[in-house]
């Protein structure tokens, strides 16, 4: 984006600033979330909600937000490049990403690239640790990440604009507008995050003695969101969520002489939802169409590419009934048809139906029980019966105990089933049993959540060479994973001074059952922390990430590891109180200029800078 | 690119014709004299391991040990020698790293003119390196016809010219001023005259031809791989006539071949077999069955059989046997161990 265009864009917005002045009276605020079950059926598990104020303090892409604020471990192929996760010691496709209640992990490879998602496109991002396949389906093994858009049904006209400019020509434009009254609600958003990303590799030189730098790492991610809701009356409402995104990235080089490649991927998601609320009986109907595609250019100087596309149609009916004062049941039926085609996978259709039953029982204000069971029906694979069983008991004001037991799964992807040659149509889904105990302590302004879990995963899919030399996926390994997660929040006000402290710590032992070795690329320890302070118009913050070392080989060769690293960021902003909010901020990222990488030969940038302007009007 | 591995059927074996060194000079010219290199193609970086001939001394990563943080690049494919130098071809990095073969000290890198380089041979101060260039799965128009031989001046270490092959190309041997090139996806044996830099008439050998060896004026080409039936094709260089030995069904999917002292050694699955060069039928009696479940490199040299296990998420293995099939040594190598190169 050239500077000229940027100016034009700002001018365009100025007109809106003028007409937006009058709105400031807030009446009764009714906010509707699309993913109702996240709230309703997660009282026995730990859900961490990252709202707007946390989102804006972090770098634009979802990887940074979650890396610095959650227990999830990330592997990045360089800054802004492919970014995959491990949650509770599970594999990249065992964390499901849920967009407004719909599972959006790629049908082709089963996972989500967290650097293709701009955090500010959502009103809140929640991280739910532990199994969730009964509600969210495939991949909800280690945990789920929820991207939520909330529609408010009250009178307002609000605009948010955040502009970022930082090192390596990193530019962010994020705009969101909310227009609503008691009947209508619309939220329209646009985000564009790009960077030439040509940072220097600290203390690394070529054989000729030249400074090495991140070549061919440029990226550009554009997303447009439009969400509309309409309330017919107090009982019936209709919502439409749409999102279109395109990520155009080159892939950074390991050696300067490699052929430069480029990877373009995009998606289009549309979700129409009907909600009916008839006292004891509730109904939620969803229909979604999701399109995803990629194009891989093996050489950026030619137009040749390989590609893949999938189109999914998802229909879902969730019928709820309040049996008694304390007991509620939901019956969920869904049907899902996915057509996948492209280079290497041919042209295939997969149909999956499922039925699930959820029961929630609130014996008292303090004691809540949850139960869920689900079974999928498909010709493609043998699907296990999934279940989830949970209980939460509030002993007193200080202490809440949570127990949860579940069975979860991850289905084979189009690549696994149909790749030519090697795809194996006879695969089973990966499946897991998981048990966890959560202790939540609340004392004044402090909340401490500690969760211990144990997980057994079997039939892990792995591509291995067969006796005939052809690589093919097989259900091979079993993994036992156990660990502890600690989340800490503290908030305190001294006069006009506000302090917030957040910290997370994860201990993860994830071992191959046969070899007893820690899975490679799963750190035993990860710590995050943040401290923020605000007074009047000023706010300042510090955030910190420690990633323990990881093995890079399955045999845990102690010489083949990625060293532990800690990275710190600081930021400060000042609100000029021009308009509703007019914040100017400045951040120093990797302030200690640490050399670090999360994957071998993929160095991350040293100290770098970002400034931002946040306007609300 | 995980799946590129599936396309780049990277089967590898030492092919270089080891020059007979002066017998009188036994003083080592460096730490890495009198031993053999084991090439590991790697997933992120290629590495080179070294073992002394007496199998008592072993270094897992020679290049890093000597040259510090410098890297070879991805998918180390082949090593060839010339004089005191060793040339390490990294296909994914489009480069050749030139080191002293006895000290492994970096001398220079050849970084231009190469596109997915595969195998190299040397003649009169020039190296001839096959380049796979693009593949048809990504470039339907010219992927199967854009392979070439890069001619490298080994004094200047510059690619000074290219010989277009108008076909796919992979392994190469040199005999009497001509290059003989095979590729599994090419049903012809390519013949290149290096004097004129032109293609001679190719020889029809059928698809799946891979390992190629020259012995006494005859080219031996093993066909197999990927569940195909196996064949040994012999091409008489003088008149280009071909004969073939069809292997029995039990030997389908043959992998690698090497020739030593008029004996042909070949692998099927984890087993190694041998037959005389003048045999008319393949031997079905294995001389050894190695623990390697995925044989990814193979060589026979000076009374020993070398077999490697290709591992890609963990370190690989090299198994060294005598010619009767008795295991002499097991070594833990690097990722994607694909070849053995003898430095005497």
Image (cartoon, grey):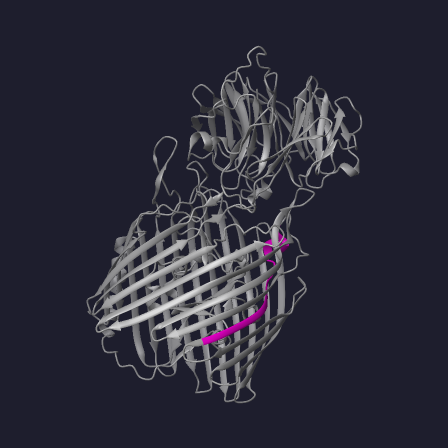
Quarter of the image where one finds residue A379: bottom right
**Is residue B131 in view from this perspective?**
no
Judge whether A369 appears above or below B259 on screen.
Answer: below
The question of residue A413 being in magenta is answered with: yes
Question: Which of the pair B3/B208 is nearer the observer?
Answer: B3
Residue segment shown in magenta:
A400-419
Relative to residue A14, is residue A547 drawn left or right?
right
Q: Give the residue at x 67% y 62%.
A: A381
Q: Position of residue B233 (x, y in %)?
A: 72, 28
**Is residue A124 in view from this perspective?**
yes
Q: Quadrant of the C terminus of chain A?
A: bottom left
How many numbered discs? 0
Quarter of the image where one finds residue A51: bottom left
Q: Position of residue A292 (x, y in %)?
A: 50, 59
Which residue in the rendered view is the most extreme toward the top? B24
Q: Position of residue A391 (x, y in %)?
A: 53, 76
Q: Give the residue at x 53% y 82%.
A: A283
The question of residue B261 being in magenta is answered with: no
Q: Position of residue A465 (x, y in %)?
A: 64, 45
Relative to residue A438, is residue A118 drawn left or right?
left
């Amino acid at each position: 984006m050239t500077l000229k265009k940027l100016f034009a864009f700002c001018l365009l917005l100025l007109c809106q600033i003028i007409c937006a002045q009058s709105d400031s009276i807030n009446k009764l605020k009714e906010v509707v979330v699309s993913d109702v079950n996240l709230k309703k059926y997660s009282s026995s598990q730990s859900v961490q909600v990252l709202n707007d104020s946390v989102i804006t303090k972090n770098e634009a892409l979802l990887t940074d937000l979650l890396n610095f604020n959650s227990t999830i471990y990330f592997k990045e192929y360089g800054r802004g490049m492919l970014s995959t996760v491990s949650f509770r010691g599970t594999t990249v496709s065992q964390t499901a990403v849920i967009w407004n209640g719909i599972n959006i992990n790629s049908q082709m490879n089963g996972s989500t690239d967290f650097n293709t998602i701009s955090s500010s496109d959502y009103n809140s991002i929640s991280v739910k640790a532990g199994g969730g396949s009964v509600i969210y389906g495939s991949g909800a093994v280690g945990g789920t990440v929820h991207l939520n858009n909330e529609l408010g049904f009250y009178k307002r006209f609000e605009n948010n604009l955040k502009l970022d400019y930082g090192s390596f020509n990193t530019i962010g434009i994020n705009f969101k507008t909310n227009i609503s009254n008691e009947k209508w609600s619309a939220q329209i958003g646009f985000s564009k995050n790009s960077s030439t990303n040509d940072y220097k590799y600290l203390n690394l030189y070529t054989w000729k003695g030249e400074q090495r730098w991140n070549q061919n790492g440029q990226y550009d991610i554009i997303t447009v969101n439009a969400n509309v809701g309409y309330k017919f009356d107090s009982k019936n409402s209709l919502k439409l969520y749409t999102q279109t995104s395109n990520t155009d990235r080159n892939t950074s080089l390991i050696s300067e002489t490699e052929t430069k490649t480029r990877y373009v991927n995009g998606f289009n998601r549309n979700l129409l939802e009907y909600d009916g609320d008839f006292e004891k009986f509730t109904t939620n109907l969803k229909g979604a169409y999701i399109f995803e595609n990629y194009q891989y250019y093996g050489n950026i100087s030619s137009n040749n590419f390989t590609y893949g596309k999938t189109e999914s149609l998802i229909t879902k009916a969730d019928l709820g009934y309040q049996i008694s004062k304390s007991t509620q049941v939901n019956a969920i039926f869904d049907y899902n048809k996915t057509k996948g085609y492209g280079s290497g996978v041919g042209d295939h259709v997969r149909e999956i139906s499922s039925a699930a039953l959820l029961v929630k029982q609130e014996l008292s204000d303090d004691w809540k029980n949850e139960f869920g069971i689900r079974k999928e029906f498909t010709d493609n694979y043998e699907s296990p019966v999934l279940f989830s069983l949970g209980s939460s008991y509030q002993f007193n004001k200080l202490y809440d105990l949570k127990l949860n037991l579940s069975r979860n799964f991850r289905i084979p992807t189009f690549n696994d089933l149909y790749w030519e040659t090697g795809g194996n149509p006879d695969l089973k889904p990966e499946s897991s049993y998981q048990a966890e105990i959560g202790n939540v302590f609340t004392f004044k302004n402090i909340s401490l959540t500690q969760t211990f879990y144990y997980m057994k995963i079997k039939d892990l899919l792995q591509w291995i060479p067969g006796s005939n030399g052809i690589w093919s996926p097989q259900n091979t390994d079993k993994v036992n994973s156990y660990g502890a997660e600690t989340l800490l929040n503290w908030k305190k006000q001294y006069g006009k001074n506000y302090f917030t402290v957040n910290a997370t710590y994860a201990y993860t032992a994830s071992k191959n059952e046969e070899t007893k070795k820690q899975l490679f690329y799963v750190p035993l320890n990860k710590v995050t922390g943040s401290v923020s302070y605000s007074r009047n118009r000023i706010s300042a913050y510090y955030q910190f990430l420690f990633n323990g070392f990881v093995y890079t080989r399955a045999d845990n060769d102690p010489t083949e590891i990625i060293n532990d690293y800690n990275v710190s960021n600081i930021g400060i902003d000042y609100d000029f109180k021009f308009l509703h909010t007019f914040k100017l901020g400045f951040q120093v990222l990797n302030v200690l200029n640490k050399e670090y990488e999360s994957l071998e030969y993929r160095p991350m940038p040293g100290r770098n800078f970002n400034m931002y302007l946040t306007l609300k009007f | 690119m995980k799946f590129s591995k599936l396309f780049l059927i990277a089967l590898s074996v030492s092919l270089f014709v080891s020059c007979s060194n002066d017998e009188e000079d036994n003083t080592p010219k460096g730490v890495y004299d009198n031993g053999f290199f084991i090439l590991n193609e790697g997933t992120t970086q290629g590495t080179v391991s070294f073992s002394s001939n007496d199998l008592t001394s072993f270094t897992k990563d020679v290049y890093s040990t000597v040259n510090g943080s410098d890297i070879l690049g991805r998918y180390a494919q082949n090593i060839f020698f010339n004089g005191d130098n060793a040339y390490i071809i990294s296909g994914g990095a489009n480069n050749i790293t030139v080191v002293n073969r006895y000290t492994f000290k970096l001398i220079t890198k050849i970084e231009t003119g190469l596109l997915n380089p595969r195998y190299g041979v040397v003649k009169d101060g020039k190296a001839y390196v096959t380049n796979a260039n693009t593949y048809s799965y990504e470039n339907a128009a010219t992927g199967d016809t854009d392979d070439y031989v890069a001619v490298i001046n080994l004094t200047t270490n510059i690619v000074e010219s290219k010989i277009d092959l108008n076909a796919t190309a992979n392994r190469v041997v040199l005999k009497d001023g001509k290059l003989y090139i095979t590729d599994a996806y090419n049903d012809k044996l390519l013949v290149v005259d290096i004097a004129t830099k032109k293609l001679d008439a190719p020889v029809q050998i059928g698809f799946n031809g891979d390992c190629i060896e020259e012995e006494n004026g005859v080219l031996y080409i093993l066909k197999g791989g990927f569940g195909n039936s196996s064949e040994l094709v012999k091409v008489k260089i003088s008149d280009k006539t071909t004969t073939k030995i069809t292997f029995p069904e039990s030997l389908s999917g043959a992998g690698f071949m090497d020739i030593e002292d008029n004996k042909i050694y070949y692998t099927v699955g984890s087993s190694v077999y041998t037959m005389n060069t003048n045999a008319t039928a393949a031997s079905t009696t294995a001389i050894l069955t190695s623990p390697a479940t995925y044989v990814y490199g193979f060589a026979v040299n000076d009374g020993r059989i070398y077999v490697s296990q290709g591992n890609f998420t963990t370190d690989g293995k090299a198994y060294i046997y005598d010619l009767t099939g008795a295991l002499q040594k097991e070594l833990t190598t690097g990722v994607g161990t694909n070849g053995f190169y003898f430095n005497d």
